[in-house]
Amino acid sequence: MSVHHHYWQGSFVGDEEAGRRLVELPAAVEAALATELETETVLAACDALSTALCDPDHAVHGRLAAHLPEGEDPAVLAELGALLGRRELTRKLRRELGDAAPGRLNRADPRETVYEAWAPVGLVAHIAPGNAATVAPLSIVEGLLAGNVNILKTSSADTLLTQHLMAELAALDPSGALAARIVVLRFPSSRQEWLRLMCAPADAVAVWGGEGAVEGVAAHVPAGCRLVEWGHRISFAYLTSDAWSDAVTLGALADDVCLHEQQACSSPQVVYLDTEDEGEVFAFAERFAAVLAARPPAVGAASTDGPDPAEAAELTTTELMARLEEHLGLTRVFAAPDGSWRVMADTRSPLTASPLHRSVWVKPLPRKRMIATLRPMRRYLQTAGLAGSRTDIAELSRTALAAGVTRVTPVGAMLESYAGEPHDGVYALQRYSRRVAVQADPALFATTACLDDLARPVVLPPPAGPLLGKEDVQGPARRVARADAELYFRSGGSTGAPALSIFSYDDYDTQMHAAARGLLAAGYDPVGDRTANLFYCGAMYGSFISFFSVLERLGGVQLPLSAGPDHRATAQALIDHGADTLFGMPSYLWQLLHAEEDALRAYGGLRKVYYGGEHFTPEQQRTLKDTFGIEVIRSITYGSTDLGPLGYQCTESTGGVHHLHADLHTMEILDLAEDRPVAPGGTGRLVFTTHARRGQQLARYVIGDLGREVPGRCPCGRHAPRFELLGRTGDVMRVATYFLNHRRFLDLAGENGGHRGELQVRLDATDARERLTVRVERTGATDPERLREVFLAGYPELRSAVAERLLDLVVEAVDGASLDRSPTSGKLLAVVDARR
């Protein structure tokens, strides 16, 4: 019976089946590339696997631990898990490819219809080393993050850890897109035909190993295919005179030498001293030998971690040769009696590779000769660990980099790394990607921010878990990890006490770019529009700051005025600086325009209004167009303080209809009374799950708004789902045994009563019965009695409540300034319930 040690696109297969499939590899790659792989799919699966690997009691951890190499510490799974978390991988994407979703064709410059993205090269063949359990799976994950199909070869001596780890990862993706992009084979390098079949259709071949391994693979790499070499490198430490006499520095250097027994490319093999004095070299070597002698023996030195026979022979030969040269005055050797460490002082400066296993060369190298001495070895240089003063570090860093070094660290931190760090002088994700561009006709694509919106729908992992309300979110918001708690906002408090929302700057940046794309879809022109930002500012309220950031990312002209009480000064600023576009809350803009109507009508330069937080009624929009000549009135975004931008309007959108920001969120519409989806087209509670969030996780969040799905594809051509906002759940009032809706009053007042101003409902309890007062903004044509008749005639439930003497209905006209508003955002309070 064949042993199934190969993992092929979701299943384990034996040698015979793997051989058949290798012949058909080109067709399998083409089929996989024909399907889409969202970056979020990779991030979500990796994050779930990370959680499992970091939990020793998790079933996945137990299954994978059984495949670790003999003697390998199970803690390596937790180390791998830490590298696969959303935080680390998102940082890696941003560092290496500039975006957390680098595959989307977004505008390179919002002011031009040129779209750029990072596209996969296609098929990446990975030739993994046999001495590092985590390298192979991490290499595949890098290929997946770039969107590639990946085929990986492990050594025939390796366990099946990588195969089973990739199977666990693929199982966490219900779409099957990850499984379709992963093949892991285990076979010896002597099986050249399999190696040829792996590399022949590849667009990039990544090789881990020394020159011999690279040469063996390079023979199979076709013309035009990228050969990505992750070969052996040499690293060194460099100490100035102040540092080499410091006991702390020597201890840190010993840490670098002993950690992993110099098996890492970043381990120091040579210690250079900034001197020409041979006596100082010998004296330092003797002191450092004493430090190494005090170190505990290597863990597992008697097991497979120790030198093999060939390595032991090299250690012996190197030490004996150094001892022979002592007679010539060239060297001096300090070594442990049991051979567990050795320090070899050498008066000659050229770089010499160490036989490893705590074997260190010490050499003189004045800084003035650093470039001339090291540059001949530049192909092999990696890390320089520096110790010296601040000025020394700055100067020596530049010199070491000029000599060919690719990374500089402090002594004691040579083996440390950070998320997204370049490897051997390059970014891996860029080596596995292509930068692609599409130039489009500005006349056809003026409002298209992302070409992918017109090409295909975004498919994100389905939402899961219980429904969350504001009370479920506020507690966890205060416990967000410090590294993610970088930006604090409070809501406007229009529907209750202000709520706290916390963001990382990366999350904020992602959301502001999304809102910017939404504005372009709504017809905003960053080249031609001159914008006054008139949102409220202060008290940790986010609107003004957010739209300042949006305009900054769009490169739009901005007057950051904010909503102020001095309407005359604001209007004068609009006129003086030629503003033609207004951003702000409808209630504030309405007040400003009517308070300064004469001046702004005489100016005649206002053309566009983008509003948020509230809605302009159809009658109000007619007034803005007829009175002030405004041509475009659209929602600036639909969103919330905690979730960020959720929806946007396109040029085909009217009223409360928005497209979902489908690359950030998934949306459900649930029944008003039960936690189940509404029937198609039905009205229900809007529930959002946000995916592109590193810090505060918000899944199945009941935002408090009502809406319905708008069926069919939008005439604008975008695939993003559409929904229509139908008010807040808080706008539905239970009064006198009936459910009444604020929006119904608003619609009746505008459509049947000709009212063009603001409207607020106030509820009071009296001794006899409840009282509902409709407070309308006083205009020249306001007739409260006429409006009362309109409400009773057009709202049967209201008419019944009044007829049954369960409710008193009052309509009163008031000045707009006397209506109750949120003190933070200035937003009109739709319903003021004073019964409690």
Image: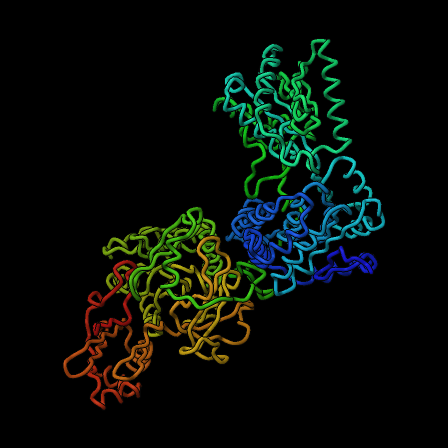
Closer-to-camera residue (420/34): 420
Residue 461 appears at what percent x and percent y?
56, 64
Answer with the quarter of the image where residue 379 lies.
Answer: top right
Answer with the quarter of the image where residue 638 lies.
Answer: bottom left
238 up-or-down from 78: above or below: above
Colouring method of the image: rainbow
Residue 288 appears at what percent x and percent y?
58, 20
731 up-or-down from 144: above or below: below
Is residue 3 among what the camera can see?
A: yes
- The residue at 50%/79% (across/down) is 680
- Left or right, 32 with respect to 478, comes to right
Is residue 575 among what the camera can see?
A: no
Residue 199 appears at what percent x and percent y?
78, 49
Closer-to-camera residue (461/557): 461
- The residue at 69%/37% (across/down) is 303
In the rendered image, which quarter contains the N terminus? bottom right
In the rendered image, which quarter contains the C terminus? bottom left
Answer with the quarter of the image where residue 621 lies.
Answer: bottom left
How many circles with numbers are drawn on the protein? 0
Closer-to-camera residue (503/648): 503
Residue 533 appears at what percent x and percent y?
35, 55
Closer-to-camera residue (495/700): 700
282 up-or-down from 82: above or below: above
- Left or right, 531 with respect to 154, comes to left
- The residue at 54%/54% (across/down) is 51
